[in-house]
């Protein structure tokens, strides 16, 4: 029986609110896993994949930065952006990837914000990885 509550919230919406057995999330210092009884934790998130398991069902969620809090058998993810795998728009991510690659290829000429383009590329590649799994 599930013993953990998982809530994933963005500035726009509640992306997921469900009972789970396990959550694996992309912390800035590396992936971390949460089972029932986990000690309280507050950490920043990187751009990556959150995995949750309930019984023998596993699902993936894209998360792009923000924070995770674990307390009282509840995992709260406050993400800048988050999408369930089935809601990822693959064509949009392909376009974002192409735009970011184009910007990065021109970095010598027009002084674009490289860090910003690299982050956009990372988001797009991660979305595509998750959507295609
Ligand atoms: P884009 O350039 O396509 O907007 P982005 O990486 O800059 O991509 P974000 O800033 O991460 O986009 O997200 C902005 C909003 O758009 C968020 O609500 C996010 O969930 C949504 N979003 C972005 N890309 C996708 C996608 N490929 N599929 C579904 N939702 C997406």
Image (cartoon, helix red, strand yellow):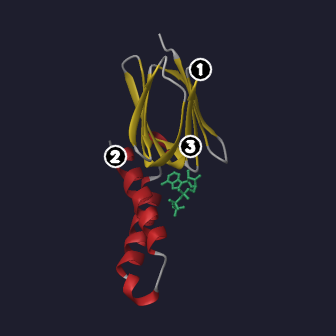
Quarter of the rendering occupied by the C terminus = top left
Q: CA distance from mark 2 to mark 1?
A: 34 Å
Which is nearer the N-term, disc 3 or disc 2?
3
**Residue beneath label 2, please?**
132
Picture coordinates of residue 73 (x, y %)? Answer: 55, 20
- Residue 67's tag is 3
Circle 1 sits in a helix, a strand or a loop, which is it?
loop
Circle 3 sits in a helix, a strand or a loop, which is it?
strand
For label 2, the crowd category at 10 Å Cα-Cα, with few meaning under 14, some 14 to 19 and many 20 or more, is few
For label 3, the crowd category at 10 Å Cα-Cα, with few meaning under 14, some 14 to 19 and many 20 or more, is some
Q: Nearer the viewer, residue 6 or 12?
A: 6
**Residue beneath label 1, please?**
72
Residue lying at 62% horizontally and 45% vertically, measured from the top left: 10
Q: CA distance from mark 3 to mark 2?
A: 25 Å
Which is nearer the N-term, disc 2 or disc 1?
1
Q: Tell me if label 2 and label 1 are in contact, CB under 8 Å.
A: no
């Amino acid at each position: 029986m599930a013993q953990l509550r998982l809530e994933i919230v963005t500035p726009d919406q509640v992306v997921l609110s469900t009972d789970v057995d396990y959550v694996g999330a992309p912390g800035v210092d590396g992936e971390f896993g949460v089972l029932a009884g986990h000690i309280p934790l507050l950490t920043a998130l990187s751009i990556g994949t959150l995995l949750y398991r309930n019984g023998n069902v596993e699902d993936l969620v894209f998360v792009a930065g923000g924070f995770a809090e674990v307390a009282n058998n509840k995992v709260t993810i406050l993400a800048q952006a988050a999408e369930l795998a089935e809601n990822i728009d693959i064509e949009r991510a392909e376009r974002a990837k192409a735009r970011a690659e184009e910007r990065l290829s021109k970095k010598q000429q027009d002084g674009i914000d490289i860090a910003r383009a690299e982050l956009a590329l990372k988001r797009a590649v991660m979305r595509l990885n998750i959507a295609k799994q």
